[in-house]
Image (spheres, helix red, strand yellow):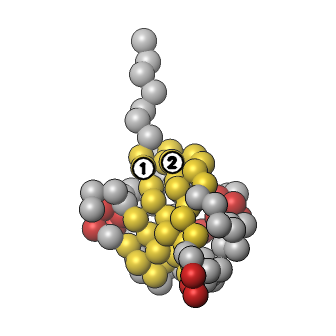
Amino acid sequence: LSLPILGISREMIIVLANKAAKALELTDHPINIGDSLDVYFQNGTYDRIAEHFTGDDHIQFECEGRNARRFKIELIPLAGRFKGKGLILTLAPEAPAIVG
């Protein structure tokens, strides 16, 4: 898949990252499985993601990586017997603003 996808555990740990996600520039180093999400995102994003583990709704919002690059995030809660145990997180880099 060309869309960057992360699997996030209830403990806010990255448990899955596809090739596209590993290629993203959120900090000065690549995404590593086993890292906490707060390593990669600016303040507030971690808390916003944590709020959605028990819900059923897919949500989208904008955020910044630690390197100030902007992204659109979609959160997809796990369902069935895995409900409340994790999320699928997709990332779409935002296009830079056109100046002029």
* Residue that appears at 34% across and 57% down: 3
Q: Residue furthest bottom?
A: 81
- Residue type for callout 1: Ala
Q: In the rendered image of this protein, does residue 99 appear above or below residue 74?
A: above
Number of residues whose C-alpha sits closer than 10 Å to that of mark 1, classed few (under 14), some (14–19) or many (20 or more): some
Using the numbered discs, state the Cα–Cα distance from disc 1 to disc 2 in whole angstroms.
5 Å
* Residue that appears at 55% across and 61% down: 75
Q: Secondary structure at mark 1?
A: strand
Specify whether 91 is left or right of 48: left
Q: Sequence-wise, which precedes: disc 1 or disc 2?
A: 2
Q: Secondary structure at mark 2?
A: strand
Task: Please name whichever residue, 96 or 82, is drawn nearer the observer in this view of the structure.
Answer: 82
Quadrant containing the C terminus is top left
Q: Which mark is residue 64?
A: none
Residue 39 visible in the snapshot: no
**Mark 1 = which residue?**
92
- Residue type for callout 2: Lys
> Residue 84 falls in which quadrant of the image?
bottom right
Q: Position of residue 17 (x, y in %)?
A: 38, 73
* Residue that appears at 45% across and 59% down: 90
Q: In the rendered image of this protein, does residue 67 appear above or below residue 33?
A: above
Specify whether 15 is left or right of 1: right
Q: Which mark is residue 72?
A: 2
> Residue 18 falls in which quadrant of the image?
bottom left
